[in-house]
Image (cartoon, grey):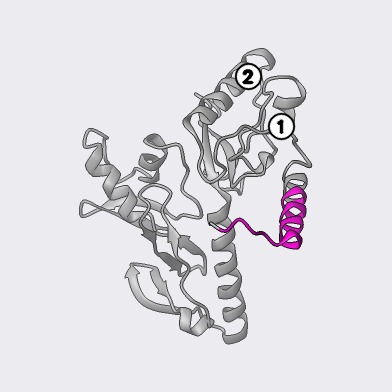
Amino acid sequence: MTKHYNMNKIKLSITVTLIALLLSGCLYPQTDSSSSTIVSKESMRNVQAAVDQYMTDKGILPIHNSDSTVDRYEKFRVNFDMLKQEGYVEVLPSSSFEGGGNYYFLILNEDTKPTVKAQSIYLIQKIIDVQRQVDAYKGNNGVLPVADQVYDGFYAIDYGALDMKAPQLHSIYSGSISELLLGESGTVYINYASDIYQMMMQHPDYELTDENDLRELLVMYSDYVPVKSAKYRLQNDEPVPYE
């Protein structure tokens, strides 16, 4: 490595770094040192403990308000303001949105056993971007930009018609590339069939029925909720989406 540096570049780099630090800490200056690209097990345990204690002390959950139309896997976000202002957390997870990270922390099973899970903001944003293009195409052409049918009522997206490249989205469960589906309703979904099938193979004792929403497997056996997904049910021993 060279020992000679361009001082102007160094000054610019320092300035950019300082600005980034200020922006990321403007709401919550204290964050932990774990990576913001994943959610550490320690972060999950700490937030879960804070939520449990808050519920025990206050009799309510520290969540943001949400209406009934929001999907259950997007609905109840942890309200870190409530936890922080009343001393239930001192250091916010750096993976959390409030800590400058890429995840929302959610609470599931709110009426029975409140459980903290994480939701990828990055995936949400990418799907919103594609959805915007799909909506614009339909508005201009009167039809959806569909390619081959993948499942009954679900199609591959014609990215050529949208004049865009297919986004390379990695599954938060397996790390493999996740394909996108377009429902007949015009809604863009991430296809979680492969992830669900892998979970089925890894957990053969899980009771499968035709009535189950199989996304529950992803939530039960990981720290993450499925983002922008259709529901899934068992059909011919394989998970298939439905709207």
Q: Residue at x 54, y 62 (%)?
A: 127
**Against 240, is 163 above or below?**
below
- Mark closest to the chain's N terminus, 2 or 1: 1
Residue 97 sits above or below residue 159 on the image: above
Q: Which residue is mark 2?
A: 55
Tag 1 secondary structure: loop
Give residue 168's quadrant in the image.
bottom left
Under mark 1, the amino acid is: Gln
Q: Quarter of the image for the C terminus: give it.
A: bottom left
Q: Residues within 10 Å of mark 1 (few under 14, many from 20)?
A: some
Residue closer to the observer: 211 or 217: 217
Question: Left or right: where does residue 202 sit relative to residue 131?
Answer: left
Dot 1 corresponds to which residue? 30
Which residue is farthest top? 57
Residue plotted at (34% across, 74% down) = 149
**Does the segment drawn in magenta span residue 17?**
yes
**SS category of the residue bearing label 2:** helix
The answer to which image quadrant residue 194 occupies is: bottom left
Give how far across and how far down residue 69 sits, in percent: 61, 49
Residue 88, percent across and down?
68, 20
Image height of 239 relative to 183, above or below: above
Viewer-nearest of discs 2 and 1 = 1
Q: Main secondary structure of the magenta part?
A: helix
Taking 76 as reference, is 243 left or right?
left
Asked whether 154 falls inside the magenta stretch, the response is no
